[in-house]
Image (cartoon, rainbow, N blue to C red):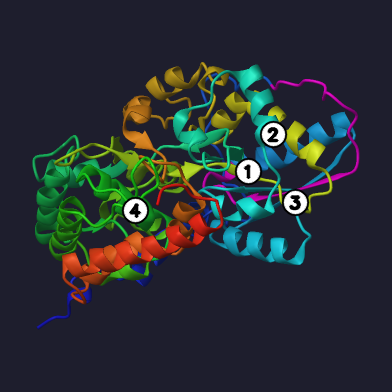
Amino acid sequence: MTPRNNRYQVSRRRFIQGVSVAAVAAACGQGQDAPSRQTPSGTGPSPVFREPSSQLSGDLRILLWSHFVPQHDVWFDDWATEWGEQVGVNVTVDHIDVTGIPARVSSEISAGEGHDLIQFIATLSQYEPSVHSMNDLMDEANKRFGEQLGLCQKSSFNPTTENYYAYAPAWSPDPGDYRKSLWEKVDLPDGPSTWDELLEGGGRIFSEQNIQMGLGLSQELDSNMYARALLWSYGGYVQDENENVTLMSDDTIAAVQYAQELFDRAMTEEVFAWNPASNNEGLISGQLSYILNSISAWRTAQESLPDIAKDIFFVPALEGPKDQMAAQHVMYNWIAPEFSTNFDAAQEFLLHYTANLARVSYESKMYDFPGYPDQVPQMDGWLDEDPFALEGDDETKLQPLKTALDWSTNLGHPGPASPAIGEINGTFVLPNMLARVARGKQEAEQSVEQAHEECEQIFGKWRSEGLVGGG
């Protein structure tokens, strides 16, 4: 019998070779040079500047991920430096691959030196004891910019300590990205709208067209997002709103059983070893029918593989037996370690960043959404008519993201993204739970029970430190 992982006719190595080096590098957020951008219709928002409330000086060292839309980083670096020149601060910006940020944060905190301001794309709540409180910054931001979105607030605020351990001014939705030409052949030209349709249509595409599904079951960010979206849609939760662990339930078991069936019918063992760029790479190389991700793969394909870009469309979170929900794909959590020598400048920079969220959204080509929506009144218009659309492409394909707030939530839903949730996310408890069953190593109930016990231990540790409620 042919081994299961050989059913995928084009190997991972071959499909990466089939994509241009520039496309793969951009999808990974690791490109050395930004590819040429599309010429948008009209011009971007004008920059906004406000004099700081106090005299600033010294150095401000910023560390952030290499954005999946490289144009953003080209703009950000110059823009941040220009702000520093205006206010008398020497700003330096470093970018590293997204997978390296958590280890870098840990090493700098352990060493007691490093960057004054660090940005990550998921909750950093586990570092609360070692970072500056952002409470004063939040008070000022809410006065200037209006009320912050609930999903951003819950991703940066610990209700147990009444502390904002991070500042979350922006986020990205996590829609389904699908290849229209593949789904048309299984009578779903508008893509799947439910988990049942994903299973049925994705299974047919795999068996009839030999193109697999792109939902990871590995220790990486997108696999975490898949696990949470599936869990919530079936009515399962890691915790309740009072921060008590509730993972062990019939709903969670049903979600894990679904994940096993989806793997059996529509995926290969490749998904057990994926990194955050793998689903992007597979989609733009034509070897995946559907992924759960942001719009970055499509933007990359626009630059390098326009014919494939024109075939990529988006759907909202899939509807399940109990709910229709997805985690935010990216949550821009900014933290300032306690060792930061220029916290005043860090706070003023973040206020400046928030005042320019319209430019942030534009330069990220609508990848970044505002945590303060009033700052980007153009967003709905951009989603209705994409200013970066290719000639001959459907310029309305981003319209499903206009309802993103209706089906997006924070990682700790229905509770906060506490230090316990941060550790569960960082140690990949949920993807591991799904993968054990998909690999045939455990039955669904047994795997859920193990994951529940792991969550209880993590919650217990943080609860003993006074950083998590419940119990």
Q: Are marks 4 and 2 in contact (CB under 8 Å)?
A: no
Q: Are marks 1 and 4 in contact (CB under 8 Å)?
A: no
Sequence-earlier tag: 1 or 2: 1
- Identity, as a three-letter code, of the amino acid under mark 3: Glu
Q: Residues within 10 Å of mark 2 (few under 14, many from 20)?
A: some
Mark 4 or 3, closer to the camera: 4
User: Between residues 138 and 301, which one lies in front from this camera angle?
Assistant: 138
Instruction: Check the image and report above or below for 192 versus 63.
Output: above
Q: Which residue is mark 1?
A: 334
Q: Residue at x 69, y 34 (%)?
A: 350
Q: Quadrant of residue 206?
A: bottom left
User: Between residues 95 and 105, which one lies in front from this camera angle?
Assistant: 105
Q: Which residue is mark 2?
A: 350
- Identity, as a three-letter code, of the amino acid under mark 4: Val
- Identity, as a three-letter code, of the amino acid under mark 2: Leu
Q: Is residue 424 left or right of residue 258?
A: right
Q: Are marks 1 and 2 in contact (CB under 8 Å)?
A: yes
Magenta segment, prevailing SS (helix, strand or loop):
loop
Q: Which mark is residue 245?
A: 4
Sequence-earlier tag: 4 or 2: 4
Based on the picture, tell me whether residue 53 belongs to the magenta stretch: yes
